Protein backbone atom coordinates (compact mmCIF):
# COMPACT_ATOMS: atom_id res chain seq x y z
CA UNK A 1 0.00 0.00 0.00
CA UNK A 2 1.27 3.45 -0.89
CA UNK A 3 0.40 7.05 -0.17
CA UNK A 4 -2.59 8.29 -2.14
CA UNK A 5 -3.90 11.84 -2.56
CA UNK A 6 -7.43 12.12 -3.91
CA UNK A 7 -7.99 15.70 -5.02
CA UNK A 8 -11.33 17.49 -4.57
CA UNK A 9 -12.74 14.73 -2.39
CA UNK A 10 -14.97 17.14 -0.45
CA UNK A 11 -16.57 20.43 -1.44
CA UNK A 12 -16.61 23.85 0.25
CA UNK A 13 -20.05 23.31 1.84
CA UNK A 14 -18.89 20.04 3.41
CA UNK A 15 -15.71 21.70 4.65
CA UNK A 16 -17.69 24.53 6.23
CA UNK A 17 -20.02 22.09 7.98
CA UNK A 18 -17.11 19.99 9.29
CA UNK A 19 -15.21 23.04 10.56
CA UNK A 20 -18.27 24.59 12.18
CA UNK A 21 -19.03 21.35 14.01
CA UNK A 22 -15.42 20.84 15.14
CA UNK A 23 -14.94 24.35 16.51
CA UNK A 24 -18.32 24.28 18.24
CA UNK A 25 -17.90 20.79 19.69
CA UNK A 26 -14.49 21.42 21.24
CA UNK A 27 -16.04 24.35 23.15
CA UNK A 28 -19.33 22.63 24.08
CA UNK A 29 -17.78 19.25 24.94
CA UNK A 30 -14.16 19.80 25.98
CA UNK A 31 -14.17 16.50 27.95
CA UNK A 32 -14.39 14.66 24.60
CA UNK A 33 -10.90 15.88 23.65
CA UNK A 34 -7.49 14.97 25.03
CA UNK A 35 -3.92 16.02 24.41
CA UNK A 36 -2.34 13.21 22.35
CA UNK A 37 1.11 14.20 23.71
CA UNK A 38 2.59 14.40 20.21
CA UNK A 39 4.45 17.65 20.94
CA UNK A 40 6.21 17.80 24.33
CA UNK A 41 7.33 21.41 23.69
CA UNK A 42 3.74 22.65 23.23
CA UNK A 43 1.41 20.73 25.56
CA UNK A 44 -2.31 21.00 24.76
CA UNK A 45 -1.58 22.66 21.41
CA UNK A 46 -3.17 19.61 19.80
CA UNK A 47 -6.46 18.11 20.96
CA UNK A 48 -8.12 14.98 19.63
CA UNK A 49 -11.19 12.91 20.36
CA UNK A 50 -9.22 9.72 19.71
CA UNK A 51 -10.22 8.22 23.04
CA UNK A 52 -9.86 4.76 24.46
CA UNK A 53 -12.19 5.71 27.29
CA UNK A 54 -15.64 4.71 26.03
CA UNK A 55 -17.34 6.57 28.89
CA UNK A 56 -16.03 9.92 27.63
CA UNK A 57 -17.11 9.40 24.05
CA UNK A 58 -20.61 7.98 24.53
CA UNK A 59 -22.16 11.41 23.87
CA UNK A 60 -20.03 12.09 20.80
CA UNK A 61 -22.47 12.85 17.98
CA UNK A 62 -20.83 13.49 14.66
CA UNK A 63 -22.95 15.22 12.02
CA UNK A 64 -24.38 13.10 9.20
CA UNK A 65 -21.92 14.56 6.70
CA UNK A 66 -19.06 12.79 8.51
CA UNK A 67 -20.66 9.40 7.92
CA UNK A 68 -21.45 10.31 4.31
CA UNK A 69 -17.76 11.12 3.76
CA UNK A 70 -16.71 7.90 5.48
CA UNK A 71 -18.98 5.90 3.15
CA UNK A 72 -17.56 7.77 0.16
CA UNK A 73 -14.03 6.79 1.26
CA UNK A 74 -15.06 3.13 1.62
CA UNK A 75 -16.66 3.19 -1.84
CA UNK A 76 -13.83 5.04 -3.62
CA UNK A 77 -11.10 2.88 -2.07
CA UNK A 78 -13.23 -0.24 -2.58
CA UNK A 79 -12.72 -1.34 1.02
CA UNK A 80 -14.54 -4.64 1.39
CA UNK A 81 -13.19 -6.07 4.63
CA UNK A 82 -11.86 -3.96 7.47
CA UNK A 83 -11.97 -3.38 11.21
CA UNK A 84 -12.27 -0.07 13.01
CA UNK A 85 -9.26 1.06 15.07
CA UNK A 86 -10.34 0.81 18.74
CA UNK A 87 -9.65 4.43 19.74
CA UNK A 88 -11.70 5.73 16.77
CA UNK A 89 -15.36 6.40 17.54
CA UNK A 90 -17.20 4.81 14.61
CA UNK A 91 -13.88 4.86 12.74
CA UNK A 92 -13.57 8.65 12.88
CA UNK A 93 -11.38 11.09 14.79
CA UNK A 94 -11.47 14.87 14.89
CA UNK A 95 -8.34 16.76 15.86
CA UNK A 96 -7.68 20.46 16.27
CA UNK A 97 -4.29 22.16 16.41
CA UNK A 98 -4.24 25.45 18.29
CA UNK A 99 -1.50 27.98 17.59
CA UNK A 100 2.07 26.74 17.57
CA UNK A 101 2.66 23.01 17.69
CA UNK A 102 3.61 19.94 15.72
CA UNK A 103 3.22 16.18 15.61
CA UNK A 104 6.43 14.26 16.18
CA UNK A 105 7.62 11.57 13.80
CA UNK A 106 5.99 8.23 14.62
CA UNK A 107 4.37 5.05 13.33
CA UNK A 108 0.88 4.10 14.51
CA UNK A 109 0.10 0.69 15.99
CA UNK A 110 -1.34 -2.36 14.31
CA UNK A 111 -4.52 -3.04 16.28
CA UNK A 112 -5.42 -6.45 14.86
CA UNK A 113 -3.13 -9.29 13.72
CA UNK A 114 -2.43 -9.49 9.98
CA UNK A 115 -3.77 -5.98 9.29
CA UNK A 116 -2.38 -2.61 8.30
CA UNK A 117 -3.69 0.56 9.94
CA UNK A 118 -4.83 2.95 7.22
CA UNK A 119 -5.69 6.60 7.81
CA UNK A 120 -7.52 8.80 5.34
CA UNK A 121 -7.14 12.42 6.41
CA UNK A 122 -8.93 15.61 5.53
CA UNK A 123 -7.29 18.80 6.73
CA UNK A 124 -10.37 20.96 6.43
CA UNK A 125 -8.71 24.06 7.85
CA UNK A 126 -5.02 24.79 7.45
CA UNK A 127 -2.98 26.87 9.88
CA UNK A 128 -1.50 30.19 8.76
CA UNK A 129 1.84 28.47 8.20
CA UNK A 130 3.30 25.02 8.64
CA UNK A 131 1.14 22.01 9.37
CA UNK A 132 2.49 20.06 6.41
CA UNK A 133 2.25 16.28 6.64
CA UNK A 134 5.52 14.46 6.00
CA UNK A 135 5.23 10.76 5.17
CA UNK A 136 8.35 8.65 4.77
CA UNK A 137 10.36 11.85 4.24
CA UNK A 138 8.08 13.33 1.55
CA UNK A 139 5.99 16.48 2.16
CA UNK A 140 2.27 16.40 1.36
CA UNK A 141 0.88 19.92 1.54
CA UNK A 142 -2.67 19.05 0.51
CA UNK A 143 -5.57 21.41 -0.06
CA UNK A 144 -8.58 21.40 2.26
CA UNK A 145 -10.67 19.60 -0.38
CA UNK A 146 -8.16 16.75 -0.75
CA UNK A 147 -8.03 13.37 0.98
CA UNK A 148 -4.65 11.95 2.04
CA UNK A 149 -4.60 8.17 2.62
CA UNK A 150 -1.59 6.19 3.82
CA UNK A 151 -0.63 3.14 5.88
CA UNK A 152 0.22 4.76 9.22
CA UNK A 153 1.35 1.47 10.73
CA UNK A 154 4.01 1.06 8.04
CA UNK A 155 5.30 4.56 7.26
CA UNK A 156 6.84 7.10 9.58
CA UNK A 157 4.89 10.34 9.50
CA UNK A 158 4.87 13.73 11.20
CA UNK A 159 3.42 17.23 10.86
CA UNK A 160 5.57 20.35 10.68
CA UNK A 161 5.31 23.17 13.19
CA UNK A 162 2.13 25.22 12.80
CA UNK A 163 2.06 28.94 13.48
CA UNK A 164 -0.54 31.66 13.49
CA UNK A 165 -4.05 32.28 14.76
CA UNK A 166 -5.90 29.87 12.47
CA UNK A 167 -6.56 26.47 14.00
CA UNK A 168 -5.60 23.39 11.96
CA UNK A 169 -8.61 21.04 11.76
CA UNK A 170 -8.11 17.39 10.92
CA UNK A 171 -10.66 14.66 10.22
CA UNK A 172 -9.12 11.20 10.28
CA UNK A 173 -10.98 8.15 8.99
CA UNK A 174 -9.32 4.95 10.21
CA UNK A 175 -9.41 1.42 8.89
CA UNK A 176 -7.58 -1.78 9.76
CA UNK A 177 -7.33 -3.57 6.45
CA UNK A 178 -5.94 -7.03 5.66
CA UNK A 179 -2.21 -7.06 4.92
CA UNK A 180 -2.64 -8.83 1.60
CA UNK A 181 -4.94 -6.22 0.01
Image: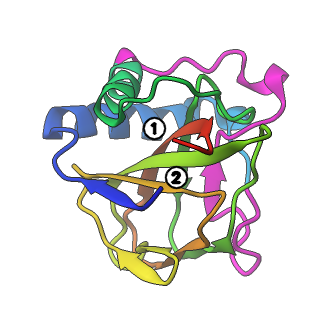
Q: Judge by depth and name the residue closer to the eye, 116 or 130.
A: 116
| Residue 109 to residue 10: above or below | below
Place residue 105 in its image quadrant: bottom right
Residue 135 % position (x, y): 49, 73
Q: Judge by depth and name the residue closer to the eye, 28 or 133.
A: 133
Count of marks placed on residues: 2
| Residue 83 to residue 113: above or below | above
Q: Judge by depth and name the residue closer to the eye, 146 or 99.
A: 146
- Seen at 45% across and 41% down, the residue is 23
Q: Which residue is mark 2?
A: 96
Q: Are marks 2 and 1 in contact (CB under 8 Å)?
A: yes
The question of residue 104 being in magenta is answered with no
Numbered disc 1: secondary structure: helix
- Seen at 63% across and 37% down, the residue is 176
Dominant secondary structure of the residues highlighted in magenta in the image: loop
Residue 22 % position (x, y): 45, 37
Q: Which mark is residue 147?
A: none
| Residue 74 to residue 19: above or below | above
Over which residues does the magenta segment extend? 36-64
Amino acid sequence: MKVQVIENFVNKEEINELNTWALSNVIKNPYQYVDPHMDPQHPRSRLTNRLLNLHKRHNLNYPKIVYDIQKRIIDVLKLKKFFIPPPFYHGIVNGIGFGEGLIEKHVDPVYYPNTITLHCNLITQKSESGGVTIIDGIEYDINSEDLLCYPVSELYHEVTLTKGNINRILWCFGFCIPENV
